[in-house]
Image (cartoon, rainbow, N blue to C red):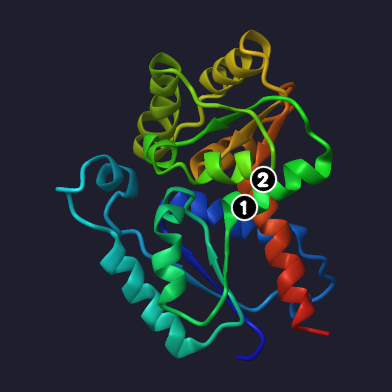
C-alpha cells in the first residue's frame, strides 16, 4: 500500500472509533477507491496516560507508545495521527523517535480558533492529566487566548463524564455534558469551550442541537488529516 497514513489510537477504543467514523464520513467518496488509505493501531492496553502524569510511580505509557512508533517506522506511513489528547504530553519524545511527522492536535485546535477570529476567554475541558501537562494551555496562550481551567468542583464533573459515564459505562450523559458547558459559557463567560479529550469529542458527535459554543479538537484533527492525506494523492 502506498500513500497512506497511520492512526495511533486505542486510548480509548470507542473514541478512536469515533475518529475513524468521522474521518470516513467526511471523506468525499463516490466509490471504494475514493476513501483514504490508512493503518489503525488500536493499542487499547497502553497504561492510563492521566494516571501516570498525576503519579509517576505508576506504569509509564511511553515505552508502549515508542514501541508503536518503532513499528510504524517499519511501515513508513506518510504521517502519523495521534488521537489521544493526553498522550500529547509525550509528543516530543514520540516525534524524536521517528522522522515521520506527527500531527499535533492541540496546536491545530489553537490555530483553528485563531483563524475563526475568536478573541475572548476560552475554556479548556479535558482530563486532569491534560490540564497538568499544560499542552493545550500553552498552545492556546501562544495564540493569544485567555484560558480558563476548571475549578476542582467543575473538573470533577468533567472527570465523571469522561471516566464514569463514557469510558466505564459506555454512556453518553448529555445532561451532565450540557451542565458543564452551561457553567463555562454562561456562568464563567467563556466565548468558546475547547473539547480536549476524545471522549468529549465522542459526546459531541452524538449530541443533537448543542446550543453551546464548542471547539472540538478531534473534529479539527479529522479535517487536517484529510487535507494532508489528499496532498499525497496529487
Give me the residue at 39% from left, 67% from top: 93
- Taking the view exactly as shown, the residue that stands out farthest to the left is 57
The local crowd at label 2, few if under 14, some if 14 to 19, many if 20 or more residues have their Cα within 10 Å, is many
Classify residue 110 by image quadrant.
Answer: top right
The answer to whether residue 156 is above or below residue 234 is above
Relative image position of residue 174 (x, y in whole percent): 57, 23
The quadrant of the image that shows the N terminus is bottom right
The answer to whether residue 179 is above or below residue 111 is above
The quadrant of the image that shows the C terminus is bottom right
23 or 104: nearer the eye? 104
Describe the element under mark 1 as helix, strand or loop: helix
Give me the residue at 58% from left, 59% from top: 104
Give me the residue at 53% from left, 32% from top: 125
Compared across the picture, whether 234 is left or right of 58 comes to right
Q: Which residue is mark 1?
A: 107
Q: Which residue is mark 2?
A: 110
Relative image position of residue 217 (x, y in whole percent): 63, 46
Mark-to-mark CA distance, 2 and 1: 5 Å
Give me the residue at 56% from left, 83% from top: 77
Compared across the picture, whether 159 is left or right of 28 comes to left
Amino acid at each position: 500500500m502506498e500513500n497512506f497514513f497511520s492512526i495511533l489510537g486505542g486510548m480509548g477504543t470507542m473514541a478512536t472509533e469515533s475518529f475513524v467514523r468521522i474521518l470516513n464520513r467526511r471523506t468525499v467518496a463516490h466509490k471504494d477507491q475514493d476513501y483514504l488509505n490508512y493503518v489503525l493501531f488500536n493499542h487499547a492496553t497502553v497504561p492510563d496516560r492521566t494516571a501516570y502524569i498525576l503519579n509517576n510511580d505508576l506504569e509509564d505509557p511511553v515505552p508502549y507508545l515508542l514501541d508503536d512508533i518503532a513499528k510504524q517506522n517499519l511501515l513508513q506511513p506518510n504521517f502519523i495521527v495521534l488521537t489521544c489528547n493526553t498522550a500529547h504530553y509525550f509528543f516530543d519524545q514520540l516525534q524524536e523517535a521517528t522522522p515521520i511527522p506527527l500531527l499535533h492536535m492541540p496546536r491545530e485546535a489553537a490555530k483553528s480558533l485563531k483563524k475563526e477570529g475568536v478573541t475572548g476567554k476560552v475554556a479548556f475541558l479535558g482530563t486532569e492529566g491534560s490540564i497538568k501537562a499544560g499542552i493545550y494551555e500553552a498552545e492556546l496562550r501562544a495564540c493569544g487566548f485567555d484560558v480558563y481551567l476548571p475549578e476542582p468542583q467543575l473538573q470533577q464533573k468533567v472527570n465523571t463524564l469522561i471516566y464514569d459515564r463514557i469510558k466505564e459505562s459506555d454512556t453518553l450523559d448529555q445532561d451532565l455534558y450540557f451542565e458543564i458547558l452551561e457553567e463555562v459559557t454562561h456562568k464563567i463567560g467563556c466565548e468558546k469551550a475547547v473539547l480536549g479529550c476524545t471522549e468529549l469529542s465522542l459526546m459531541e458527535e452524538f449530541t443533537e442541537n448543542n446550543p453551546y459554543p464548542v471547539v472540538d479538537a478531534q473534529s479539527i484533527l479529522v479535517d487536517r488529516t484529510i487535507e494532508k492525506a489528499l496532498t499525497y494523492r496529487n
